[in-house]
Amino acid sequence: MRLKLVKDDTNFDFFSRPTLWLGISVFLMVLAFGSFMVRGLNYGIDFQGGTTIRTESAQPVDVGAYRAALGALDLGDVVISEVFDPNFGPDQNVAMVRIQAQEGQEAVSGEVITQAEAALVAIVPDIKFVSVESVGPKVSGELIWTAAIAVSLAIFAVLVYIWLRFEWQFAAGAVLALVHDVILTIGIFSEFGIRFDLSIIAALLTIVGYSLNDTVVIFDRVRENLIKYKSRDLKEVLNLSINETLSRTFMTSGTTLLALIALLVLGGDVIRGFVFAMTWGIIVGTYSSVFVASAFLLWLGVKRDWTKPTDTTGNQFGDVDA
Amino acid sequence: MLQIDPWKRVGIWLTLAVGVALAMPNLFYSRVEQHNDAAAAIEMGLDTAENREAVGAWPSFLPSGLVNLGLDLRGGAHLLAEVQVQEVYEARIEALWPDVRDVLRAERAAVGTIRLQPSDTGELRVRISEQAGMPQALEAVRRLATPVVSLTGAGSTDLDISADGSDIVVTLSEAERQATDERTMQQSLEIIRRRIDEVGTREPTIQRQGADRILIQVPGVGSAQELKDIIGTTAQLTFQPVVGRTTNAGDVPGVGNELLPSLDEEGAFYILETAAVVTGEELVDAQPSFDQNGRPAVNFRFNPAGARKFGDYTAANIGNPFAIVLDNEVISAPVIQSHIPGGSGIITGNFTVEESTQLAVLLRAGALPAGMEFLEERTIGPELGQDSIDAGKIATTVAFTAVLLFMGAAYGLFGLFANIALILNIALLFGALSLIGATLTLPGIAGIVLTVGMAVDANVLIFERIREELKTARGPARAIELGYEKALSAIIDANITTFITAVILYVMGSGPVRGFAITLGLGIMTSVFTAIFVTRLLIVIWFERRRPKTLEV
């Protein structure tokens, strides 16, 4: 007896309401963008400069007392939050203290850190500073710029690759799906105020890679079926291709999500934001392969003349002997 | 039909064997690490019984490469420093004034009186009272300029000298600035490296980043502040009279003397007068060069005060050795051949070209040539790193088990083949990481977990395809073959696009993000290999033995 996530020979019509799905996607994107504009992102120190101190002590975290102790130092905006994680032991009480970048300082000053640590030790004698990170505004400005370039570059590289391997309509569909995924991910980060730091950019790029992976598998089948069924109309071919690859789509997303959820629950709080971004991205990316990339491809239409001198799979890798 | 050439089979088995062998040391991480540390210590001359035992704990014929743990897993300190290179220009320009004054005084008849004017930093402004004498004045000052020795600055001189009304303006030329920056950065790197090596920590990373930045990552240091203190200490360079030489570390040097070890000669010690003749603060330059016999040597130059002291001392002590001491170690103890006036001299010895270059760098490296601003500092405690490793281990194990069960349930025997391939994939990934000495970071662990999830994708594609091909009933062998063949284009496209993003992450990212990019990129390569070649090999071997008439995937 085999486990089957999708029964054989499915025949769903994914494009019975094409405008509805595209509409929902556009609506979600507008919503995400709106949230980003209104709330902005909760930038980590990588992008904004400043200092974070992770403290650990056997005593319960008293956020008020911490705030009072640090407030006396006049360090500007100080955010204190307690951290919870199922991996923590009973005597492990963890808090994150975040201090804004100090006015008029291009570089990091050790003084601020020393002062803050001394103030905390005064109220919680057994406190330990398990990590202290400080980024100057000069570097953080560059980091955010580099990050933006990295994401744009990735999307552009993908555009070029798909264009070379398929047709421009496919590239446009794939890239729209990527933009959709990136915007929705940024949207959920701004809506829930989850800390957005350098590792989230890595997650975004992975989502770009994954979502594309999914889209390309479907497109690959679409191309094959376009050659095979020259007379069927595009909508039919798209539906057929998505149905044929549906089982694979669910299997792969399933295994990846299994792995990510294990990491999300058990991987510790340090990378939780990163893993969350990826988990969300995989869900959105799987959705967008069908309802954004393929829907957009249907809307754009595609040339039907594939009479290139090619074999059945229709590409230069077709005859690689594995 | 369904078959694989024997040489291909051998290739696949060999790749797997090498991969597994390279990955294996990571299973015995602490033992191999102690072995490696001890082996390095013995290499350095610390041949103790303890070290020998640690070396013996891991057979030397086995590979001993390990995946390095990043700062976020091991704990330690990270600093990004910006070297204030322009400080060096200012110092250079300010030091020019006495020379400019001297050459202009010689032309007093034509240029009249000369006066130093207040000016912007990095420029020297001298006013002459007779504007008519300007061409002569410029010519005189220009004689001070020397050609720049660098690849890019060939043909230009180190000073830009121009007239502005009745002012002579002297600045460093663009070529000289670049050459100076280069020297400043090299000196800074060299000094930082020496400082950190002295502390003796494992695998520090000291890298130049961009034009004027230095990245310093040191595992095992308690805090970034501690690291700053280590770097900030200035190097002490002194020139001291030599009293005697000994091989006994227990010798009593006597009042006013001290006993210092030699830098390159094991077991050699010098007895020196404690009072230095000249110190490194008075050294203005040191360059590798050759002596009159064409042997590698080092040229150095003192400032005027240092030159006077050095000249007086050498005149009085011809035939005696004097020691060049850096941080309480004797670099060399040459014999004074003649009176050395003018404050410049040459150090000869049994140098190779590399050694003379190194010595010149060390001599210049007395103190940090310019100040540093710290743009980024991070301290990660070892407990946090250990917590992250533990959490990562649990998560990876759970993810791994879940995926194995899932694949087994979905594809039966073929799922088992895919699972074997997946396990081999992880072994290959660790082998590759150990081979290139990559650094594993926390996002890197996430990259591995993601690889576990995604690695089965290629097999899923193939198996689903085989299922489809079976429906057209052309026999199991043909179905398997077609399944692999037709799934290939989707696998290649899907993996290349993900690989592109991994490359971009690697190029644009830094630190932990780069660690993630490496595991993701390598994971893609190993997973494509295992999913395509290894599962195919397993299936072919199984098929040859069983010759099944029907196939259930």
Image: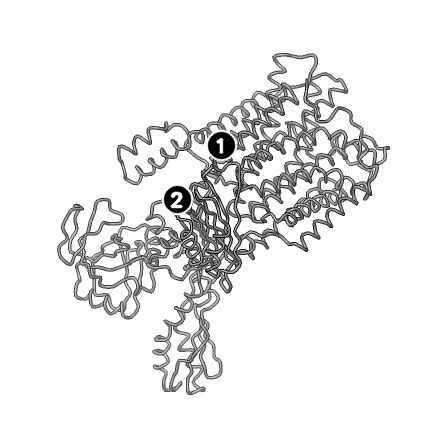
Q: Closest to the observer: B184 or B120?
A: B120
Q: Is residue B68 visible?
A: no
User: Residue B205's spot in the image, x, y percent?
Assistant: 43, 47
Q: Closest to the observer: A253 or B53?
A: A253
CA separation in Å, label 1 and label 2: 25 Å
What amino acid is at disc 1?
Answer: Gly
Say above or below: B234 vs B249. below
Circle 1 packing at 10 Å, graded few (<14), some (14-19), many (20+), is many
User: Residue B170's spot in the image, x, y percent?
Assistant: 44, 74
The mark found on residue B431 in the picture is 1
Say above or below: B223 vs B388. below
Q: Helix, strand, or loop for circle 1?
A: helix
Callout in the foreground (1, 2): 2
Q: Helix, strand, or loop for circle 2?
A: loop
Q: Closest to the observer: A284 or B448?
A: A284
User: Residue B360's spot in the image, x, y percent?
Assistant: 33, 56
Q: Closest to the observer: A16 or B116?
A: A16
Image quarter where the C terminus of chain A lies is top right
Q: Indicate the chain on which mark 1 is placed.
A: B
The mark found on residue B220 in the picture is 2
What amino acid is at disc 2?
Answer: Gly
- Left/right of residue B373 with respect to residue A144 in the rendered view: left
